[in-house]
């Protein structure tokens, strides 16, 4: 899936040059699938792209704790938690084109909102 920065004060029209490409298993109704994630976690990768900054590569992680009993986050370096970017209720959001999700910046308390811009399924199709 591709998430792009949604409208915000700094970018009133959003920004397609700022966002994430995430490889993650989804349920048929579009939720992150923790059971399938456990089986495929090594393939659940993230690329953060941001105009003017080098791409960052990490992995999608599902950890115990947090509201609802678990937290989804992006982990860039295994040896530290300081660079982790947590999603806001990602386990309850539906990932379909046009929906919105929030991700907290690493090391900060600022959440940014992203639009689900595109979904690509493993077979290379768009699910239609």
Image (cartoon, rainbow, N blue to C red):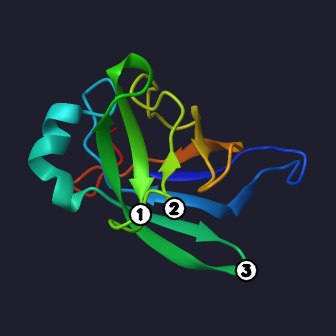
Going from N to C along the chain, the mark reached first, 2 or 3, is 3
Res. 123 image quadrant? bottom left
Left or right: where 108 falls relative to 43: right
CA–CA distance between discs 1 and 3? 24 Å
What residue is shown at x 74% (from left), y 58% (from top)? 15
* Depicted 5 relative to depicted 63: above or below: below
Query: Is 20 drawn above or below residue 63 in the view shown?
Result: below
For the residues labelled 1 and 3, say whether their Cβ atoms are less than 8 Å apart: no
Identify which residue is drawn at 30% across, 41% down: 62
Using residue 126 as the reference point, say whether residue 101 is left or right of it. Answer: right
Residue bearing mark 1: 80
- How far is mark 2 from mark 1, CA to CA? 7 Å
Rendered position, 1 above or below 26: below
What is the crowding at mark 1: few (fewer than 14 residues within 10 Å), some, or many (at least 20)? few
The disc, 1 or 3, on the residue closer to the chain's N-terminal end is 3
Task: Please name which of the two marks, 2 or 3, marks the residue nearer to the observer.
Answer: 2
Q: Which residue position holds label 2?
A: 83
Image spot of residue 20 (x, y percent): 52, 58
Please tell me the numbered disc located at residue 52. 3
């Amino acid at each position: 899936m591709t998430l792009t920065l949604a409208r915000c004060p700094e970018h009133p029209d959003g920004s397609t040059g700022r966002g994430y490409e995430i490889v993650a298993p989804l349920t048929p109704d579009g939720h992150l699938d923790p059971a399938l994630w456990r089986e495929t976690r090594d393939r659940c990768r993230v690329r953060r792209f941001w105009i003017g900054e080098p791409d960052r590569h990490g992995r999608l992680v599902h950890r115990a704790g947090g509201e609802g009993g678990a937290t989804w986050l992006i982990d860039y370096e295994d040896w530290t938690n300081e660079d982790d970017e947590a999603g806001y209720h990602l386990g309850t959001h539906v990932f379909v084109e046009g929906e919105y999700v929030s991700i907290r910046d690493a090391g900060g308390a600022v959440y940014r909102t992203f639009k689900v811009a595109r979904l690509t399924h493993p077979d290379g199709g768009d699910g239609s």
